[in-house]
Amino acid sequence: MTGFILFTVFIILLLSGMPVAFCLLLSAICSAIYTGIPLSIIFQRMFGGLDNFVLLAIPFFIFMGNIMEQGGMAKKVVQFSNIIIGRIKGGLAGVNVLASMFFAGISGSAVADTSSIGSMLIPMMNEEGYDKNFSAAITATSSTIGLIIPPSNAIIIYSFAVGGLSVAKLFSAGIVPGILVGLGLILTGYIISVKENYPSHPTPSLKEAIKIIKETSLSLLLVLIIVGGILGGIFTATEAAVFGVVYSFVISFFVYNNLKIKDIPIILRKTIKTSSVVLILLATSTAFSYILSYERIPELVCEVLINISDSKIVLLIIINILLLFVGTFMDMAPAILIFTPIFLPVVQELGMDPIHFGIMMLVNLCVGLCTPPVGTVLFVAMGIADTTMDKLLKYLFYFIIPMVAILLLITYWPAVSMTIPNLLFK
């Protein structure tokens, strides 16, 4: 009965339009009152959940991403990507995806990627004759790579939801899947570009290319330092995030000269707003998860699913379908926090490593970010392209296909995500 109250109150409040964090908290309070759990324990769990050094990485990575976005990093990355892939048929489509892959390692945010890369490339693609719905679709889907390739705030949130799983291992596990998603989107964009006869994009002269490479190398060096430092055990994710803030400020302010003192209050306000939303969500999800554990709901779900079938293939398909459905109406962070403690015992019973499951879950929910009705990055791309959902869906479907195909590859072939962690962390 407690579980019924928990989920019924949560769903009713969610459908009413209430923010997810308050839905989680109020449903946990209602369940606690029914069960007789002192409310002081609920609030103790909330504050205790945030008392975690690793979580400091989230606001610092958000701060770093905002600095790089304001400091013109996206423009440098686009120019660098054009040197590599701009000359192929439909070159700007490939540049769009490749720039997202590079920028992903800097911002770690899908929305920042969509707004920064999209605001430059979508108008450029429109000027060169690309269908604006195609431009918006490839921008939205490619921007989700930032949630798979490190550094990713979503990976840190998953680590928190699991109970302190190594962020370094999770970061390393996301590298190959993120690259595969990017290659799948580039190939799809190329096929459509050939069919629609979209043009290649002019590449800069050798002198200009050398200049662009020199300027961009300073920013890409940040990716190598952060990821390499974390994987090499030189510093923690939180320490890496703090270093990234200082480095990005120095590069944007003193080298690129695109960041001004007057921009700092805007960046800080944006960082505080985003960080507050995430941290409140983490706190309330801790209370929600406590009720789940208290009522042994994850164990119950595990028993039900295992009784449905003893086939690992069938159960993983069921879990993927459920997560895909969840992703269509719920943002990634709350979905990770709510469903990780529910499904993790099931996959562990099947012998799946929590790191493998985490990457599978992230790629799955990335598809949800690109699909209506809630797809956050989808609506950002739509706004930039000035188009409507019904017109965008045609091209969006083409780019969803490789993402789902790679999701299945990750699900049933553990080596895709586990090879690098197994090599680096024995």
Image (cartoon, grey):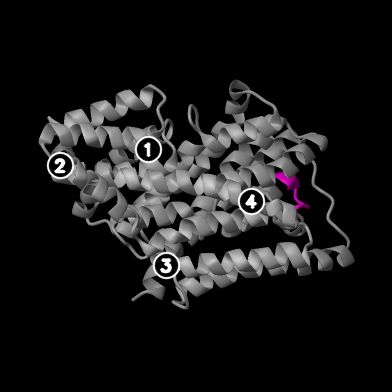
Q: Is residue 253 among what the camera can see?
A: yes
Q: Which residue is mark 1?
A: 21
Q: Nearer the viewer, residue 338 or 61?
A: 61
- Pick whichever of labels 2 and 4 is earlier in the sequence: 2
Report helix, strand or loop for mark 1.
helix
Marked residue nearer the N-terminal end (1 or 2): 1
Label 3 residue SS: helix
State the separation of the CA atoms marked 3 and 2. 37 Å
Instruction: Give the answer, above or below, for where 290 lies relative to 68.
Output: above
Look at the image and give the residue range highlighted in magenta.
Answer: 85-93
From the top left corner, tell me how far across and down residue 107 is, in percent. 59, 55
Q: Position of residue 73 (x, y in %)?
A: 70, 57
Image quadrant where one finds the C terminus: bottom left
Tell me which amino acid carries mark 3.
Ala
Distance from the alpha carbon under mark 1 to that under mark 4: 24 Å
Q: Between label 1 and label 2, give the one nearer the viewer.
A: 2
Tell which tag, 3 or 1, sits nearer the viewer: 1
- According to the picture, the residue beneath numbered tag 4 turns out to be 267
Tell me which residue sits at (77%, 67%) in the image: 255
- The residue carrying mark 3 is 168
**Residue 126, numbered circle:** none
Q: Is residue 98 visible?
A: no
Name the amino acid, label 1.
Ala
| Magenta-span inclusion, residue 89 | yes
Q: Amino acid at mark 2?
A: Pro
Q: Position of residue 1 (x, y in %)?
A: 12, 29
Where disc 2 sits, the SS reads: loop
In the rendered structure, which disc, 1 or 4, sits on the residue that comes first in sequence? 1
Q: CA distance from mark 3 to mark 1?
A: 27 Å
Residue 38 disc label? 2
- Label 4 or label 3, whichever comes before in sequence order: 3
Q: Is residue 131 magenta?
A: no
